[in-house]
Image (cartoon, rainbow, N blue to C red):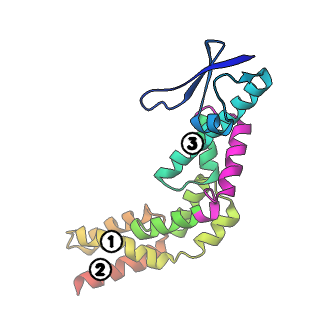
Amino acid sequence: MGKITALKEGKGRNKRISVFVDGRFAFSLEGDVVVAGALRVGQELTASEAEKLAAKDQHQRGMNAAVRLLGYRPRSEAELRERLLRRGFEKATIDSVMGKLKEQNLVDDTAFAEFWKENRQSFRPRSRRMTRLELRRKGVDSGVIDRIVAEIDDGDSAYRAAQPKARQMKAADYDVFRRRLGEYLRRRGFDYEVIKRTVEKMWQERDS
């Protein structure tokens, strides 16, 4: 292919390294790939070596993108795969990225499902059925979902979900109170019997 004549770092947020071969721009690489490959000015570069560098660069770019996504919040493997696919990464690259992330314990669907359940139960309690549906939409395996949602007590979750809503309600009439609170709990996936018991309990506590 030729001899590397310059390695130039991009400006601003773009930290990719531009590789010049025989005085002309050839391609750009992630900095980690340049360091790992020990690239240097004056080095002879074959076409085969350039192809290997391109593959390593794709992997590193995929890793960087995945780590950024995980920086916002934990994600399921299926969710990460879908996001990387949308960003234009090929399946082979995504597979290698997932393998590396699993080695580093950065992707674990059981841990993700536990996080999702705990987050929901702490801040926006909802039913076992609704939590199951959300995790299924995230692509989590049904066996993992079964283990995680088995820990959810719908009665307790409905009570905790109803408390702040009931405190905000000004309705003095039980039928209005029942309808409004019931609709609120229904949207969170609770069934009729759980809603009925919860509404009655909240009304009694409010009345007392």
* SS state under label 2: helix
In the image as oriented, which residue stretches furthest toward the right? 48
For image coordinates 60% across by 70% down, the residue present is 148
In the image as oriented, which residue stretches furthest toward the top? 23
In the image as oriented, which residue stretches furthest toward the bottom? 208
For image coordinates 35% across by 80% down, the residue present is 200
Q: The disc labelled 1 sits on which kind of residue?
A: Arg
Tag 2 and tag 3, C-beta contact below 8 Å: no
In this orientation, which residue lies closer to the viewer: 30 or 62?
30
Q: Quadrant of residue 125?
A: bottom left
Q: The disc labelled 3 sits on which kind of residue?
A: Asn
Disc 2/disc 1 C-alpha distance (Å): 8 Å
The crowd level at tag 1 (other Cα within 10 Å; few <14, some 14-19, many 20+) is: many
* First-in-chain label (1 vs 3): 3
Q: Position of residue 79 (x, y in %)?
A: 59, 48
Q: Quadrant of the N terminus?
A: top right
Which is in the foreground here, disc 1 or disc 3? 3
Image check: 208 left or right of 115?
Answer: left
Q: Position of residue 134 (x, y in %)?
A: 55, 57
Image check: 200 left or right of 133?
Answer: left
| Mark number, residue 178 | 1
Residue 176, placed above or below residue 9 = below
Q: Is residue 90 magenta?
A: yes
Tag 2 and tag 1, C-beta contact below 8 Å: yes
* First-in-chain label (2 vs 1): 1
Q: Over which residues does the magenta segment extend?
A: 87-111
